[in-house]
Amino acid sequence: MTNLASAVSRMDSKNSRLKALALVSAIALMPVSAFAETDAKSQVFGTPSNLPLTLSGSYLSGRLAGFQKDYGHAAAFYEETLAADPTNTMLLERTFLLKLANGDVEDAVHYAGELEKAGLKNFLAQLALGGQRIVEGSYTEADETLAAGRNGPLAQLSVGISRAWSLYGSGKIDEALVIIDNLQGPDWFGVFKATHKAHLQFAAGRNEDALRTIEGAYALDQAAIRVVDAYARILAANDRKQDAIAVLDQYDEQFRGHPKIEQTRAFLESGEVIPPMVSDPAEGMSEILYGLGAVIGRDGGEELSTSYLQLALHMDPNAEFAAIALGSVFERMEQPARAIDAFMRVPDDSVLKREAEIQVGLNYNALEKVEEAREHLEALITADPSDLEAVIALGNILRSHEIYEEAEVVYTQGIDTIAELEPQHWLLMYFRGITRERLGKWDIAEADFRKALELNENQPLVLNYLGYSLVDQGLKLDEALEMIKTAVELRPTDGYIVDSLGWVYYRLGRFEEAVKELERAIELRPADPVINDHLGDAYWMVGRRNEARFQWNHARDLGPTEKDLPKILDKIANGLQETPATDAAKADSDQNGG
């Protein structure tokens, strides 16, 4: 939970800096006599109502908020600055984009109109205006707006596919298909073009054409859930139900299933007529915005990604994948409150709702709202005790807060719902084993770890934890060493596992080997206090006393646990005993053959 707590601390620090800048800029950059009435937007940082507002102050505050990815406050400050300088097109563009990224789509559409009036060709503004006209059913006007201009591959693809859907809305199917065919760009255009062309053809009842087209998309990307789903549906629409099921089977085998695939399979097996995935122009434009926005979000570019996804949800409020993607982007931005808002936008009847609700619980935890997280996830488990993902989420939250007794109960209740343990259940056994080890119930903890290894042989996380725990207790040291060596072979760049190998060498009195492995662990995880502490111990035992104290001092400065800090301070002051505390354990190991 240290990472979660530090994330919240960083968020608090960001807000403090924003408040400070709003205050300093207002005082320093304006004549004392120049006061303005403070509105709701300027109060978001808690500044006193009688402070002067300035063009420069609001602009600088907006820039800082933008750097901090606080789109709501950034948009508010830019909007204030724009009100004072309404002809400034740079301010107009920033206000528009930040409004869109923040989800204030109606305001963004207004500013997009202002950009259009000013003669500025901003492709996102065109998308916002064109999208709004599609939502209103004004398809001809939408196409005219979207056709005004586009530059760059992303703009060409976004605008081109959106135009095709506006033409579809006007009944101009052939023109829509030509628009897609004529899009020229890099190789990654291919799957988007083929998928949307197939969507259009399927929606227009041209099932055979749609099948030929979607086969091309499927050949390009068999891992994309939306492509696989569309392919199965179109196969079924062409009286190839068994082939459709085979496509779903292949996806399940390679990627361990997906709720949407399960839903489509149920439709196929029910014999019902499966409708097209997309049959409405607004849904079609939302689909391309989601597809591109999700990819952009994975590669950085959060402002652009959130702009796409917010507009996608405006176009289609039931766009479940867009809501999930938006929540995931906010998680990567370490904005759990915004992530919760996004995940809550997944419709109640969506098969993705359970996944979204689990993420809501995890994000409550990221906000350090442990009780809210617990209540949220407990409600999911009460509704479905066999929901193992919710069980794992709640158990892990409780365990991370050292509420081990309750965590053990949660894991056990989940395990008890399983009729027969299968390979994928190793994780539950592993987590319960950790919890029981923390509770001092070593015998049953070890049994859980070994059961996890039965289910998933040579799983490096289990080998590492079990091996480390055995070493820490001076038990079965030879077996523990082999376990950790195997884990390192499987995960050679995992600093924590390499640290375990170094520490087992230390506990065995093989100090030179310990130094070698712990130095490598430090290279992989230089900011971990435990690894630095371990390396200090190893340096001391090989006579490198100054380096040992350097590592202990570094460990102290990296924020060790309250339990470890006094021990580190004592070592800095007094060093270590010449004989390691584990000699007795080593002798016991030698007597018992490890």
Image (cartoon, rainbow, N blue to C red):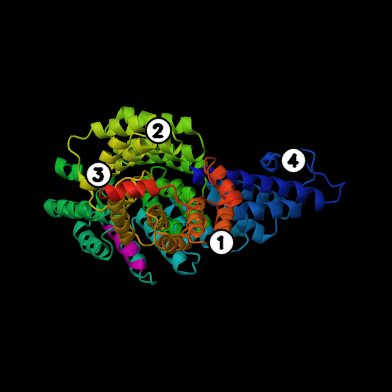
Ranked by sequence position, the earlier of labels 3 and 1 is 3
Q: Which residues are magenta?
A: 188-201
Q: Which residue is mark 2?
A: 404
Q: Nearer the viewer, residue 235 or 30?
A: 30
Q: Amino acid at mark 3?
A: Arg
Ranked by sequence position, the earlier of labels 1 and 4 is 4
Label 4 packing within 10 angstroms: few (<14), some (14-19), many (20+): some
Q: Nearer the viewer, residue 356 or 435?
A: 435
The answer to whether the residues at label 3 and label 1 have Cβ atoms under 8 Å apart is no
Q: Residue at x 35, y 56 (%)?
A: 168
**Viewer-side label of 3, 4:** 3
Badge number at residue 450: 3
The reply to whether residue 345 is visible in this rendering is no
Q: Which residue is mark 4?
A: 38
Label 3 packing within 10 angstroms: few (<14), some (14-19), many (20+): many
**Viewer-side label of 3, 1:** 1
Q: CA distance from mark 4 to mark 2?
A: 50 Å
